Image: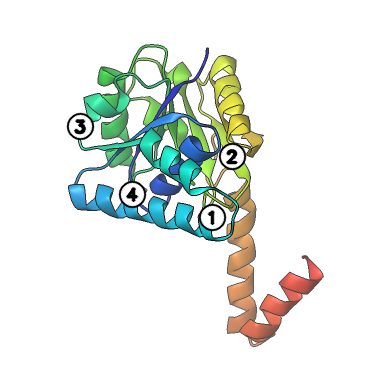
Amino acid sequence: MEIRKVAVIGAGLMGHGIAQVAAQVAGYEVHLKDIKQEFLDKGMDRIKWSLGKLVEKEKLTQKDADAVMERIHPTLDMKTAVGEADIVIEAAPEKLQLKQTLFEAFDEFAPDHAVLTSNTSSISITEIAKTTKQPDKVAGMYFFNPPQLMKLVEIVRGEKTSDVTVEVITIVSQKMRRETVLCHRDRLGFIVNHILVPALLDAIRLVGEGVASLEDIDKAIRLGLN
């Protein structure tokens, strides 16, 4: 399946960055949706600012930056956003019920061939997929913050995610020049956060127990573990 059009749902902290990467690096046509015009405006302003910084550093020409902006289409309407999408990337707040409601809407308005993904960092993909008629087309596609700079995408299988869906997400991620890892089981925290959170909690305990200072713990991890 050839991917031409991407829908990003949520123009906030992660969504605007994902939209930029999809339009700038992969050259996709992107519909960026949010629930209020002010959120869309803020997201588009952030993208314009980010592209402006690249122009200042001579990593991008102004002509190319303008072309990226033209490929991103902000909208408040769900049907407009996902109606012709080949892949949908949901980047809404981390609330299961909200995500399930959104995926119900994707199921109604997106084409049958569309792959439906969530940028969630920890919510069960299987639970999200239960609200759709095609759970085999649902998977996690977790970018890291900020998406414009971080090179990893964590692909997460739900219980019914198909191999074809994983393949499509892998191809899209590669076109965005991102590395991918595959989480075969839908478990809390997936890969990165499952490893990271216990380490953070242990660091907090070390401070609480008076073992070391915050500054020395930071230095130890930075210089000792790179």
* Residue on which the image places disc 2: 154
**Within 10 Å of the Cα at label 3, are there few (<14), some (14-19), or many (20+) other Cα atoms?**
some
Whether residues under marks 4 and 3 lie with C-beta atoms below 8 angstroms apart, the answer is no
At 47% from the left edge and 43% from the top edge, which residue is drawn? 63
Q: How is the image coloured?
A: rainbow
* Residue on which the image places disc 4: 44
Q: For marks 2 and 4, give the CA distance.
A: 25 Å
Whether residues under marks 2 and 4 lie with C-beta atoms below 8 angstroms apart, the answer is no
**Within 10 Å of the Cα at label 4, are there few (<14), some (14-19), or many (20+) other Cα atoms?**
many
Which structural element holds mark 1?
helix
Residue 72: image location, x then y, percent: 37, 37
Whether residues under marks 3 and 2 lie with C-beta atoms below 8 angstroms apart, the answer is no
* Residue on which the image places disc 1: 54
Q: What residue type is labelled 1?
A: Leu
Asked where in the image residue 83 lies, by quadrant, the reply is top left
Q: Which of marks 4 and 1 is in front?
A: 1
Q: For marks 3 and 2, give the CA distance.
A: 28 Å
Residue 9: image location, x then y, percent: 33, 38
Residue 203: image location, x then y, percent: 63, 73
At 58% from the left edge and 75% from the top edge, which residue is drawn? 204
Residue 143: image location, x then y, percent: 53, 44
Asked where in the image residue 180 lies, by quadrant, the reply is top right
Q: Which amino acid does label 3 sit on?
A: Asp
Q: Is residue 14 visible?
A: yes
Whether residues under marks 2 and 1 lie with C-beta atoms below 8 angstroms apart, the answer is no
Q: For marks 4 and 1, give the CA distance.
A: 15 Å
* Residue on which the image places disc 3: 77
